[in-house]
Image: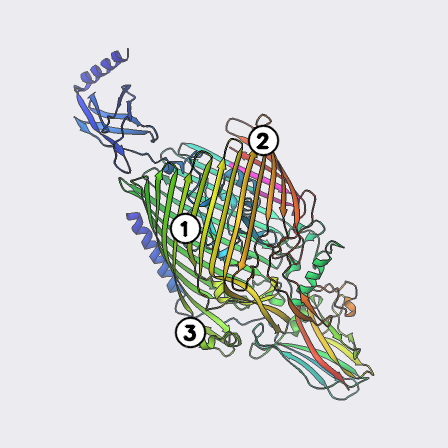
């Protein structure tokens, strides 16, 4: 019976010890580090004119609320825009910029731009060490076509940049996994 | 001559010590358990070469003894022979207890000839050491699949979870050396942390009828026991080495045991396995390697009346998960499924396929499980056996995701689960025809989710308290009929602290139902403190009846309740490998199962047949199903919710063996199962499809114990499945598509071959050489119950060579 007693003492002390070690204090909240909440594309006309911004913002990350997508206005026809992307994690305060992280691993990331109804053409202007495109900087040139359509911006992590068409901006053979996918309704006037 | 020596000896004693030799030793010989007299026990005094026997009342008398220490042997049919030493200082009375219950001793003998089963009235199957050794390089789930009615749910081919009659994870209890495994078994991609090499035998009990192990085993119980130890002075061991072509894997496992006749024993065991990327018939499965290391020590003292055991085990598994299965959103999933649909035309490899490597990169798991156990038992005369057991388990799980920047080498999941258990049971077996067992179990569990991961916790921090009491009885009505009854009550309390996104809290309606449990409001997040209590009652009744030597039937009924696990309650987030958002529900109540089963066994000289049927009605069955899609910045994701329904599972498991001759045999194992959602009136998801395995075997003892088996494994397509397909917009192709996540893969047929011989190297050393070929025709196939079936084919052909040395 002595063994029994010893065992129960051991059990109880273990219980007390574990219970005491983390009972009273509440767990720390987790600051999500890699979350991208906000993507803003700024399109500045080369020859002057109105700047167009496209933004998608999902402050609750994987939560139930849908991202808020906004487009500041219409694009002008027959115009070349210099485009830049800004990525932010706004769950932190102040908001944490994410661009630098992508630039540091630019060979593992690529943005893809798809514009419907032949409203505009797109070109990369930034490249990684292997001269493959990244897509944080680009140009968009609208055609003479007027009308509405969509601009889809997709960020792929670890795409096969060397596969057919990928470095020309064709997403078909890119592979990898999708980190961002945003669809904007655009119009050309 | 004998008398002459005796007389001389007596004289010598008389002369030397001046003693007389007229003392008398007498007493009674009775059974240890019930105190009944043992008639006809033989008493043999070796030094005097004298015999006597006990009379009908169990009394014995030895006369004409000299003063001094008398050593004699007592033996009786069916009892363990005892050596007794008595100091004779005059006429002496000495009571002798004999042991009729050999089953206790069988546990500590290498070769138990008795019934290897743990229960008499349940559907139970045992895998013996020799079978387990064949799976030395594989996992518990791989070995158990060879039991009719047991299948597995896989994530790739190294994460294998056993499924008993269609149920798995929290519905299956795994016992190892008396310890209930607590290793975050709630997750489908959490394989049991068991090193098969540490087990001497495995018993699988279908259904919840063995209440001593727990009341919530709606699926069944898997009981692993260490190698039996023989109580004699000896040192023995074994080493198994194997190498295989697929995965270019190798494994080594070694066990060494030292035992002493007095009851002490010590066993040390260690094993290591290493696999690189496995191969499907047409391509390499990048990042599917495994690196596993484990060891255990088992020591103690064991006699009939008392004993103790101390056990420690350590197991670390580093498991790679197919790189191509890590995806971003539903569009990526659609791309993967489209690749699958091309199989058969061009057999395109999965995305991100690279050349063979032993390297294990993200996504990967790194899981360490440690068990410390101490138990103690004592038998009390004319009463029974008391046992006390304490165990502590520490389960550390890291999961590494494909991450960027500074977080690249940081785990995305870092959970530490600590469990303490104290159990005690009392078996009253004074009457072998009516054995009672009472038990008590107390448990405390703490889960800690490390916030350093930088990823929201999948499972929150919690404390869990368990208390259970049970009573079991076994009645033997006559030589052919056994009855079992059991009753158990369990109380479970979960005290969790979880952060919810405020938006999720509101979306779930918790702000209405659970407003009072919010303890902190951080703006976008809420800290809440759910305290959930569950009261569970389980009961079982079973009967076995042997009509004659050939025919036996078994019936049983089991009622069991299972409290929801932490993933069913708290899941809240994105699952990358499935590209889905999984949501638990705080409102989930326990599920209740009523299982009725019946078995028929037939056995004659050449044919043995075992038919096991069951019907399991589960009220409030907890399962996960898609309920819609949610949009995030990453794109769209289907939402899978844990919900409850009433379910019915029923099926038939067949095991048949036919010996044509002494050398040739044919074996069939088939299982059929159906699962229905009674409320929605549709099939249940993830129910194993019909499977039949036929084996043609040949044995020849004269050719170095030659043994060869040709196996055919046929798995039919699951035609009964719920349609969970959903429509989704794919921005890159600008179209709406129907995402087919439901249709099971087609029927497949595989052929395997295995053979082995045993060479006697010396009197105590055997070498067993085995070869094993799986998937002989390199058939491409996918299995419905493999979570990675959307992404890649299953394994191609494999050659394995295994060397086993017993010494």
Query: Tag 3, which chain?
Result: B
Q: Measuring 35% from the left and 40% from the top, which residue is drawn there?
A: B476
Which element type, helix, strand or loop, lies under badge 1? loop
Q: Start and end of the magenta stretch?
A: B238-251
Does residue A159 appear left or right of residue B565 in this picture?
Answer: right
Q: Answer whether residue B581 is magenta in the image.
A: no
Q: In the image, residue B554 lies at what x, y percent?
A: 44, 43
- Quadrant for the N terminus of chain B, please: top left
N-terminal of the pair, mark 2 or mark 3, is 3
| Neighbours of disc 3 within 10 Å: few (<14), some (14-19), many (20+) | some
Query: Tag 2, which chain?
Result: B
Q: Are marks 2 and 3 on the same chain?
A: yes
Res B33 → quadrant? top left
Q: Are marks 1 and 2 in contact (CB under 8 Å)?
A: no
Residue B348 against residue B506 in the figure, above or below:
above
Q: Residue B642 or A90: which is nearer the viewer?
A: B642
Q: Mark 2 — residue?
A: B660
Query: Tag 1, which chain?
Result: B
Q: Mark 3 — residue?
A: B517
Res A118 → quadrant? bottom right
Residue A23 against residue B793 in the figure, above or below:
below
Q: Nearer the viewer, mark 1 or mark 2?
A: 2
Does residue A182 appear left or right of residue B647 in this picture?
Answer: right
Q: In the image, residue B354 lies at what x, y percent?
A: 70, 55
Q: Mark 1 — residue?
A: B213
N-terminal of the pair, mark 1 or mark 2, is 1
Does residue B189 appear left or right of residue A141 in this picture?
Answer: left
Q: In the image, residue B613 lies at what x, y percent?
A: 50, 47
Q: Answer whether residue B244 is magenta in the image.
A: yes
Q: Residue B359 or B502: which is nearer the viewer?
A: B502
Cα distance between the residues tagged 3 and 1: 34 Å
Q: Nearer the viewer, mark 3 or mark 1?
A: 1
């Amino acid at each position: 019976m002595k063994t029994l007693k010893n065992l129960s003492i051991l059990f109880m002390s273990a219980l007390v010890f574990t219970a005491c070690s983390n009972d009273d204090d509440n767990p720390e909240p987790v600051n999500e580090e890699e979350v991208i909440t906000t993507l803003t594309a700024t399109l500045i006309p080369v020859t002057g004119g109105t700047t167009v911004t496209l933004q998608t913002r999902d402050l609750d990350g994987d939560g139930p609320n849908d991202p808020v997508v906004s487009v500041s206005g219409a694009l002008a026809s027959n115009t070349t825009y210099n485009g830049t992307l800004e990525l932010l994690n706004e769950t932190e305060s102040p908001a944490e910029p994410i661009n630098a992280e992508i630039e540091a691993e630019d060979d593992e990331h690529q943005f893809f731009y798809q514009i419907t109804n032949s409203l505009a053409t797109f070109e990369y202007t930034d490249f990684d060490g292997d001269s493959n495109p990244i897509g944080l900087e680009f140009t968009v040139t609208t055609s003479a076509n007027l009308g509405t359509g969509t601009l889809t911006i997709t960020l792929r992590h670890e795409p096969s940049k060397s596969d057919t068409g990928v470095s020309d901006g064709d997403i078909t053979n890119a592979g990898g996994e999708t980190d961002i996918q945003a669809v904007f309704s655009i119009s050309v006037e | 001559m004998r008398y002459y020596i005796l007389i001389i000896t007596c004289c010598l004693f008389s002369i030397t010590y001046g003693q007389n030799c007229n003392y008398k030793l007498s007493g009674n010989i009775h059974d240890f358990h019930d105190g009944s007299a043992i008639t006809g026990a033989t008493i043999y005094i070796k030094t005097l070469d004298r015999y006597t026997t006990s009379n009908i009342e169990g009394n014995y008398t030895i006369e004409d003894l000299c003063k001094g220490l008398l050593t004699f042997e007592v033996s009786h049919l069916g009892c363990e022979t005892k050596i007794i030493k008595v100091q004779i200082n005059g006429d002496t009375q000495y009571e002798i207890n004999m042991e009729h219950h050999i089953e206790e001793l069988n546990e500590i003998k290498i070769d138990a000839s008795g019934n290897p089963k743990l229960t008499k009235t349940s559907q139970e199957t045992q895998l013996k050491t020799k079978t387990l050794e064949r799976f030395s390089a594989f996992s518990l789930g791989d070995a158990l699949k060879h039991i009719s009615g047991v299948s597995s749910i896989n994530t790739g081919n190294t994460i294998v979870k056993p499924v008993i009659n269609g149920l798995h994870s929290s519905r299956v209890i795994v016992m190892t050396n008396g310890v209930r495994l607590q290793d975050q078994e709630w997750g489908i991609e959490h394989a049991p942390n068991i090193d098969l090499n540490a087990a001497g035998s495995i018993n699988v009990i279908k259904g919840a009828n063995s209440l001593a192990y727990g009341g919530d085993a709606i699926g069944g119980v898997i009981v692993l026991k260490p190698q039996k130890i023989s109580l004699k002075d000896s040192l023995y061991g074994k080493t198994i080495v194997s190498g295989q072509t697929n995965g270019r894997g190798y494994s080594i496992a070694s066990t060494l045991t030292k035992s002493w006749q007095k009851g002490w024993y010590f066993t040390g065991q260690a094993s290591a396995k290493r696999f690189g990327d496995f191969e499907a018939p047409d391509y390499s499965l990048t990042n599917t390697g495994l690196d596993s290391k484990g060891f255990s020590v088992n020591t103690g003292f064991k006699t009939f009346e008392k004993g103790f055991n101390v056990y420690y085990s350590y197991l670390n598994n580093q498991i790679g998960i197919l790189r191509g299965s890590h995806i971003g959103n539903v569009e990526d999933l659609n791309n993967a499924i489209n690749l699958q649909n091309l199989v058969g035309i061009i057999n395109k490899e999965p995305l991100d396929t690279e050349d063979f490597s032993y390297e294990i990169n993200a996504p990967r798991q790194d899981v360490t499980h440690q068990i410390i156990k101490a138990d103690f038992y004592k038998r009390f005369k004319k009463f029974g056996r008391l046992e006390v057991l304490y165990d502590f388990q520490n389960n550390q799980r890291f999961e590494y995701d494909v991450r960027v920047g500074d977080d690249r080498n940081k785990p995305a999941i870092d959970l530490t689960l600590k469990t303490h258990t104290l159990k005690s049971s009392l078996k009253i077996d004074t009457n072998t025809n009516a054995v009672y067992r009472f038990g008590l179990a107390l448990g405390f569990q703490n889960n800690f989710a490390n916030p350093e991961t930088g990823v929201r916790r999948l499972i929150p921090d919690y404390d869990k308290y368990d208390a259970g009491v049970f009573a079991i009885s076994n009645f033997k009505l006559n030589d052919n009929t056994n009855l079992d009854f059991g009753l158990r009550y369990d109380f479970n309390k979960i005290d969790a602290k979880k952060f919810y996104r405020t938006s999720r809290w509101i979306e779930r309606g918790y702000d209405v139902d659970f407003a009072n449990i919010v303890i902190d409001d951080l703006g976008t997040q809420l800290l809440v403190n759910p305290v959930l209590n569950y009261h569970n009652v389980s009961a079982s009744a079973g009967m076995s009846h042997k009509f004659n030597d050939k025919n036996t039937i078994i019936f049983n009924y089991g009622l069991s309740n299972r409290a929801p696990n932490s993933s069913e309650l708290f899941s809240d987030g994105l699952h990358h490998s499935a590209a889905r958002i999984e949501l638990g529900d705080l409102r989930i109540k326990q599920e209740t199962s009523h299982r009725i089963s019946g078995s028929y066994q037939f056995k004659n000289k050449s044919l043995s047949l075992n038919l096991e049927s069951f019907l399991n009605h589960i009220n409030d069955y907890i399962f996960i199903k898609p309920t819609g899609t949610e949009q995030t910045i990453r794109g769209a994701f289907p939402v899978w919710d844990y919900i409850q329904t009433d379910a019915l599972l029923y099926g038939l498991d067949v095991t048949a063996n036919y010996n044509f001759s002494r050398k040739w045999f044919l074996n069939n194992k088939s299982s059929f199962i159906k699962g229905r959602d009674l409320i929605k009136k549709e099939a249940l998801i993830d129910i194993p499809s019909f499977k039949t395995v036929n084996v043609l075997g040949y044995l020849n003892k004269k050719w170095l114990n030659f043994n060869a088996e040709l196996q055919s494994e046929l798995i039919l397509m699951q035609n009964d499945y719920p349609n969970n397909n959903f429509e989704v917009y794919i921005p890159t192709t600008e179209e709406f598509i129907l995402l087919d996540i439901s249709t099971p893969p087609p029927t497949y047929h595989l052929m395997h071959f295995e053979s082995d011989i045993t060479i006697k190297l010396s009197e105590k050393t055997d070498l067993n050489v085995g070869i094993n070929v799986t998937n002989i025709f390199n058939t491409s196939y996918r299995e419905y119950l493999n979570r990675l079936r959307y992404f890649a084919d299953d394994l191609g052909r494999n050659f394995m060579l295994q060397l086993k040395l017993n010494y």
